[in-house]
Image (cartoon, rainbow, N blue to C red):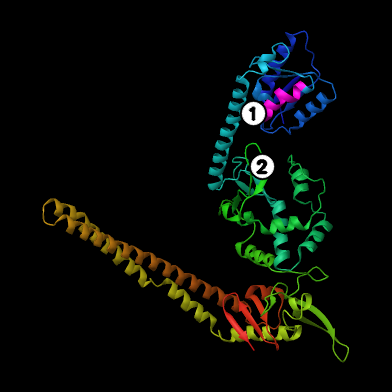
Amino acid sequence: MIIGIEKQESNSITSQKELLNQFIEEHDDLVVYDTYVDDGFTGTDFNRPAFQRLLEDMKNGYINCVIVKDLSRLGRNYIEVGNYIEQIFPIFNVRFIAINDNVDSYKNPASSNTILIPFKNLINDEYCRDTSIKIRSALNGRKKKGEFVGAFPAYGYIKDKENPHKLIVDKESAEIVKKIFEWKVNEGIGNLKICHRLNSMGILNPTGYKIKVLNQKYHNSSDYTWGVSTIRNILKNDIYIGNVTQGKRRVKSYKLHKLDKVPKEEWITVENMHEPIIEKELFEKAQNLMKKDTRVRKNGSLSMWAGILKCADCKRAMHKKYSKNKSGKIYEYYICGTYRKKSHELCTKHTIKQSDLENAVLEVIKYHISKFVDIEKILNELEVNEKKPLNNSNIEKQNNIQIEKIRLLKKGLYEDLKDGIITKEEYLEYKEDYEKQIEHLEQAIINLKRRSEEEKNKENENVKWIEEFRKQKNIMSLDRTIIDELIEYIEVHENNKITIKFKFKNCVLL
């Protein structure tokens, strides 16, 4: 009976087999029933497939002896190894032999009960713990450098043959990734319809592509059709803008191999590590859509106001309803979700017709555009201002010069004390005063830098805001793309009053 621990067979397993076969040839009382090999599995886990098969054969009475090279080959969890040697094997009358550790529970029963056995198992366990810490530390080091350490890259990428820690674009699957983002953002298609479209086109999902096209040994479902969760995961993955984000999950310990989710703030992200498939602007638009309540119409496209409208009082999403007027014509309107779903006591209707809403929003956008008749002139002025050197930089330079002067004065204090020019009390007083001056100037520099950054960000936002409105100079009607470009959300008040929160500026329409 042979068991090896550790999917082409490793050199370690081969050498173990040779040792065990030689041992059996030297003992006429031993006959091989089967060889149980868990190559590539950790010894701290006893749910290894071959080991579980061994237990079944043992319970069925097919084997009455287990032979290993040494105790570490049985396992490296000292509690579990001790349990098998002292409890489970004896219960099933199974002889246990560890060749290099001189353990034979039949010929020398004392050898399996000696105090050395727990110590050896504890050392094997500690070896695994130490190895686990070193491996985890090495992997974290690679992650922080932005090196890819996973087994399989995300759909759209493959590993560079010359450097397996670097990703390169897989052109065929990358085109599908681009389509998914474009359909979502530019055409306003929901995730379910994207699935239907890909499946009707006969496109393999990421699992199928890895197995059938890339010939990767990827073990997963045999269902190669697209699902909503797959689309959602692709749209959320920042790998497509060149980032490498890792450490989203980790095992509990070197003994418990259950994966736990890691808080997002602890993920390791390194930007610009490989060629992006998606532009950052398109990716950010997709993220904004994902954050919103984006219900889709029956045709699979997004409603123009999905995730945009909310009640001004309870902040709950507005619900779409249909009604008939006196002439029998059906019209669309929106009503507060709290009023409709929960209680008329908690909020009021806040109703608004879809046509009134659309007309009001269109007029507000036109009004803002009219304020920027000479947009090109404004943009040019902003660019000129951006190129002008900030006065803050001159102040910062002067502060640094002053700091150096004070440091020289502070440095000379000790010489004055030593030469008896000043007393010890005066030395401490001057020293404290100089340190306070330096601290004050350094804080002033920090504040200047922060204000400069705020001013720069404000200018960038102003430029972006004007450019977004410039795109809509000749706007005649609204669509989902325009709404997403310009508007963060719209609050609906009573009496057909709305508040529009633009992505760059606020506006209230009565």
Mark-to-mark CA distance, 2 and 1: 30 Å
Q: Which mark is residue 336?
A: none
Towards the viewer: 465 or 266: 266
Looking at the image, residue 213 sits to the left or right of residue 428; the answer is right
Does 258 sit above or below residue 496? above
Q: Amino acid at mark 2?
A: Ala
Residue 189: image quadrant is bottom right
For the point 62% across and 61% down, which residue is it? 279
User: Which residue is farthest right?
Assistant: 328
> At x 42% / y 70%, what residue is drawn?
451
- At 57% across and 55% down in the image, what residue appears? 265
Q: In the rendered structure, which disc, 2 or 1, sits on the residue that comes first in sequence?
A: 1
Decide: is 103 above or below 432. above
In the picture provided, is 236 more to the left or to the right than 339? Answer: left
State which region is magenta: 77-90
Residues packed near mark 2 inside 10 Å, few (<14), some (14 to 19) or many (20 plus): few
- The image position of residue 185, as x and y in percent, is 70, 67
Secondary structure beneath label 2: loop
Residue beneath disc 2:
151
Would residue 83 be counted in the magenta stretch? yes
Left/right placement of residue 213 relative to residue 430 reads right
Q: How many numbered marks, from 0 up? A: 2
Q: Is residue 352 visible?
A: yes
Residue 444 in the image, given as x and y percentages of width and height: 35, 67
Circle 1 sits on which residue? 78
Residue 453: image quadrant is bottom left
Name the quadrant of the N terminus: top right
Three-letter code for the amino acid on which mark 1 is drawn = Tyr
| Residue beneath the point at 59% across and 86% down | 370
